[in-house]
Amino acid sequence: MTERIRSTPTVRTEAKTPAVDGDPPPPRRRKTGRGELRKHLTLIVALIALLLVGALTKGEDFLSTGNMITILTLASVIGVVTVGMTFVIIGGGIDLSVGAIIALASVWCTTTATQSYGVAGMVLCALLVGLGCGVLNGALIAYGRLVPFIVTLAMMVAARGLAEQISGRQSQLVTTDLLALAQNRVLGIPLLVYLFVVVVAIGWIVLERTTFGRRSAAVGGNPEAARLAGIDVRRHTLLLYAASGLCCGIAAVMLTAQTTTGTSTNGQLYELDAIAAVVIGGTLLSGGFGTITGSILGVLVFTVIEDLFILNNLEQPIQAIGKGAIIVAVLLFQRFGRARAVPTLT
């Protein structure tokens, strides 16, 4: 009797590489070198167009060296805030408290000025206040598992209220050497602008050339996949908000030196300006992708627009309406005109 022998199919198994807590590979992206170049070119063309409009309408008043330096000075403070906001949004978060943190840090550092701690004490106080607020935001979001929108909204209200309480709703004048940061110039350019360039350069290096930047994109793109790859998602989220708070502390020092006052009204609507600049710069609100270069170009575009509004003596409500319309127009153009150029995670 012949016995029928059944052959069992051979199953091939692939060895799985365990996740290593170290340098996980970034999320795969489509090859979008041309698309990214297009996106930046769009902002560059928009900036050049605005400069041409200013040159044609205001001539030498707009193209003068003094006005160009004014534009860079105006962009310096909000630009530093935007660097921190870029990291937060790439990491899948949002920070609505940046303006209020600036106000609180400026009031607190000018209060220390009355106690003879000197310039170093003022700067250290502003940095610690900004960093502390950022760490608190990050701790509540990462370890308390609260929604970033709600946490930063609460911080916005609380920080602004604390700033009013400390200052008594009065402006506190600064007469120390801190003013030299805005008044002194090197090669005709204020020190504020150099500080802005340094912060932008550090932000670009960290985002593009370090594992921290790759991990930020991984956390924002897919937190669960990042966790499985060995990233401590909660700790990294805390660090992202701490970085944003530190940028707010730096911006508070710059704004206090520029306006010579510390007041609870400092930083009004800075959060909206920073978010708009980041989004127009190409950073995805859903997280996972963004560039410092695009964010800074967005800041420059908005600053030039604001300068044109001021030179044309437009009232504040008209400026707000015009800025809102421009934001919507640019986003619609990028949405429908460059939809295929936006990188997506696969």
Image (tube, rainbow, N blue to C red):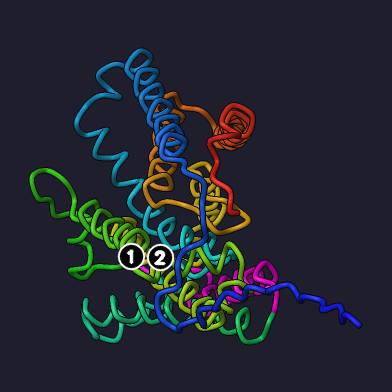
Quadrant in the picture for the N terminus:
bottom right
SS at circle 1: helix
- Which amino acid does the dot numbered 1 rest on? Val
The quarter of the picture where residue 8 lies is: bottom right
Task: Measuring from the top left, give residue 295's x and y in whole percent.
Answer: 43, 48
Q: Which residue is mark 2?
A: 213
Task: Measuring from the top left, give residue 325's x and y in whole percent.
Answer: 62, 31
Q: From the viewer's side, name the closer residue of 231 and 137.
A: 231
Q: Is residue 7 shown left or right of residue 37?
A: right
Q: From the viewer's side, name the closer residue of 113 and 200.
A: 200
Task: Measuring from the top left, give residue 125's x and y in whole percent.
Answer: 34, 81
Magenta residues (range) = 146-173
Cα distance in 3D space between marks 2 and 1: 6 Å
Q: From the viewer's side, name the closer residue of 291 and 55.
A: 291
- Which amino acid does the dot numbered 2 rest on? Gly
Task: Measuring from the top left, give residue 147's x and y in whole percent.
Answer: 70, 73
Please identify the residue farthest to the left as the structure is shown: 187
Please identify the residue farthest to the right as the structure is shown: 1
The quarter of the picture where residue 175 lies is: bottom left
Residue at left offset 38%, top offset 31%: 44
Question: Relative to 216, is 269 above or below?
Answer: above
Residue at left offset 39%, top offset 29%: 47
Numbered mark located on residue 206 in the image:
1
Question: Relative to 210, is 36 above or below?
Answer: above
SS at circle 2: helix
Residue at left offset 36%, top offset 21%: 54
The main secondary structure of the magenta stretch is helix
CB atoms of marks 2 and 1 within 8 Å? yes
Q: Is residue 147 magenta?
A: yes
Question: Relative to 126, is 25 above or below?
Answer: above
